[in-house]
Image (cartoon, rainbow, N blue to C red):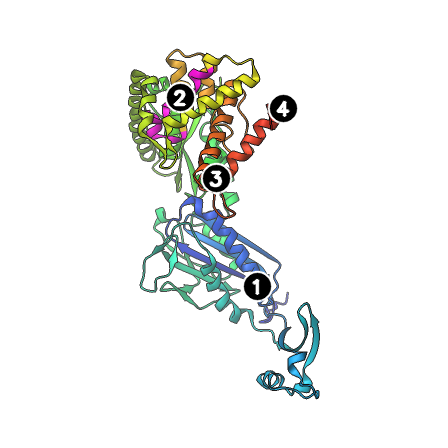
């Protein structure tokens, strides 16, 4: 068998890795989209062809992998527009200074210029040949430009050059085939090495060619491809609970955890069974928000005292990790138990008076004043419908915002409405009233599910209508680039409810 050496002018894979300190999970997907868009644009601008382009990420790495990038850019012609024909020649047909100056600039005679018609008229132009350049040379500017193109909601400055990025850049891996692309950003020079898992010593991992990058890092316990890492996490989580029940699905949490770890390993944990007396929504929120943990249901479907954490690293020292999770979970659940009992002792109705101290907007008034307006609007809607219990509606509106000043919602704002329903039900209110307190926040997005109950539907409509009228009355209107009070979404919801739920309304013009 004859071994054939790869020629210098053959296409090669290219690789760029930005090694950083842990980037917030929510920043990563947008950063990858920007990274890919910049790469596509810059390669096209320089005439570099490639077979495929992928972006990957871990919490500490943003990666661009280019398959079979051409060794040399294509020779291309760029048309440089010169003076118009009218200004290029005088009345006698002689070339003017404008034409001669333009031609001289490019080493031509005026008679060598060609003319073309544009939407602005007829112009002289010069077709400049741009010869192809080696990819290795072009990447010296392309790779830094890709890094500079990435923006984040918040940035840091950590070194003298003042370069801004979400987190400090600690390493840059830049290769075209076996060759290192030499450049520097933020006082970090590009190299041919990356870093393994921090928990295993953060060792340097040399990369000879881009094609070995993914496997080499996998051998150092770093799963580079985010989709592969997510499925490993999913399987590990499901395996951990196989003998005790089922994971309560939470795809958003799984997506977040996927960008918090480089090598996911699930750990099955338990909390004290006494906390099962808390509402399941409270239990799930405590575990999810504070510890990024998954709740577990039993084989009969009931909420259990098991939960699953996902650690970053191999299945070592699991008992120590488990105890850590359980200790923190116990403390959080103890706090939640205290908030819950206190809120039930105080009741909901005393909270309504406290709404007078919460400003909805300085030019619009307090939450309490908003509730009074919602009541008036709701009564008008109820009169149109004709089959609504007005006393139940009045009570539901009165209590609709009461949980906003509860201790539980102060700690976990995501539970607004949900805690109002739970507390109202526990304190003896009718089920329809309790349900309306939660449902009036629906839909949570412009296209989300509308309230199912009549009371919740009326209050949801009245609440959005009040927000629209109140904001517009003091001059707060959404623009093409800004809608800080969500008025566009509120308007869509009002229209949806009117069309989908109240088609028989007799509304006067």
Residue position for label 3: 255
Q: Residues within 10 Å of mark 2 (few under 14, many from 20)?
A: many
Mark 2: secondary structure? helix
Answer with the quarter of the image where residue 495 lies: top right
Q: Earlier in the sequence, mark 3 or mark 4?
A: 3
Mark 1: secondary structure? helix
Q: Nearer the viewer, residue 241 or 382?
A: 382
Residue 78, horizontal then vertical, whole percent? 63, 73
Q: Is residue 100 left or right of residue 58?
A: right
Residue at 58% across, 30% down: 496
Q: Earlier in the sequence, mark 1 or mark 4?
A: 1
Badge nearest the viewer, 3 or 4: 4
- The stretch of residues the image draws in magenta is 393-414
Q: Earlier in the sequence, mark 1 or mark 2?
A: 1
C-alpha distance separating marks 1 and 4? 54 Å
Please give the label number shown on residue 503.
Answer: 4
Q: Earlier in the sequence, mark 3 or mark 1?
A: 1
Q: Is residue 90 left or right of residue 310?
A: right
Badge nearest the viewer, 4 or 2: 4
User: Does residue 107 lie above or below 69 as drawn?
Assistant: below
Residue position for label 1: 43
Q: Is residue 405 magenta?
A: yes
Q: Residues within 10 Å of mark 3 (few under 14, many from 20)?
A: some
């Amino acid at each position: 068998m004859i071994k054939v050496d790869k020629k210098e002018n053959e296409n090669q894979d290219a690789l760029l890795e930005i090694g950083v300190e842990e980037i917030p999970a929510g920043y990563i997907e947008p950063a990858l989209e920007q990274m890919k868009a910049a790469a596509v644009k810059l390669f096209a601008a320089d005439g570099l062809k490639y077979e495929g382009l992928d972006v990957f990420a871990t919490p500490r790495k943003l990666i661009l992998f280019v398959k079979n990038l051409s060794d040399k850019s294509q020779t291309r012609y760029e048309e440089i527009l010169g003076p118009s024909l009218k200004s290029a020649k005088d009345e006698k047909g002689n070339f003017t200074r404008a034409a001669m100056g333009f031609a001289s600039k490019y080493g031509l005679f005026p008679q060598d210029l060609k003319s073309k018609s544009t939407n602005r008229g007829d112009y002289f132009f010069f077709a400049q040949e741009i010869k192809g350049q080696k990819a290795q040379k072009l990447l010296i500017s392309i790779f830094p430009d890709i890094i500079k193109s990435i923006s984040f909601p918040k940035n840091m400055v950590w070194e003298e050059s003042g370069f801004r990025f979400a987190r400090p850049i600690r390493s840059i891996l830049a290769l075209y085939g076996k060759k290192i692309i030499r450049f520097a950003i933020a006082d970090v020079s590009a190299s041919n090495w990356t870093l393994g898992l921090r928990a295993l010593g953060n060792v340097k991992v040399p990369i000879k060619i881009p094609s070995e990058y993914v496997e080499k890092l996998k051998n150092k316990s770093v799963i580079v491809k985010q989709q592969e890492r997510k499925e490993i996490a999913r399987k590990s989580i499901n395996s951990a609970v196989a003998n005790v029940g089922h994971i309560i699905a939470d795809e958003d949490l799984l997506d977040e955890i996927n960008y918090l770890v480089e090598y996911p390993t699930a750990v099955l944990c338990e909390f004290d069974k006494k906390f099962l007396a808390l509402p399941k929504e409270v239990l799930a929120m405590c575990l999810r928000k504070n510890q990024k943990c998954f709740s577990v249901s039993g084989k009969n479907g009931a909420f259990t005292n098991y939960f699953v954490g996902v650690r970053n690293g191999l299945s070592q020292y699991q008992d120590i990790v488990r105890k850590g999770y359980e200790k923190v979970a116990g403390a959080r659940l103890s706090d939640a138990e205290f908030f819950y009992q206190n809120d039930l002792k105080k009741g909901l109705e005393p909270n309504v008076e406290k709404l007078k101290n919460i400003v909805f907007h300085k030019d619009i008034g307090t939450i309490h004043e908003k509730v009074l307006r919602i009541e008036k609007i709701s009564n008008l809607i109820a009169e149109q419908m004709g089959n609504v219990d007005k006393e139940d509606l009045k009570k539901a509106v009165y209590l609709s915002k009461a949980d906003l000043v509860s201790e539980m919602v102060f700690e976990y704002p995501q539970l607004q409405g949900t805690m109002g329903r739970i507390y109202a039900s526990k304190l003896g209110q009718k089920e329809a009233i309790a349900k309306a307190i939660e449902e009036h926040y629906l839909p949570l997005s412009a296209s989300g599910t509308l309230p199912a109950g009549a009371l919740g539907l009326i209050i949801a409509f009245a609440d959005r209508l009040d927000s629209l009228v109140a904001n517009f009355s003091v001059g707060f209107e959404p623009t093409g680039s800004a809608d800080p009070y969500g008025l566009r979404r509120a308007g869509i919801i009002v229209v949806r409810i009117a069309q989908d739920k109240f088609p028989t309304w007799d509304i006067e013009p």
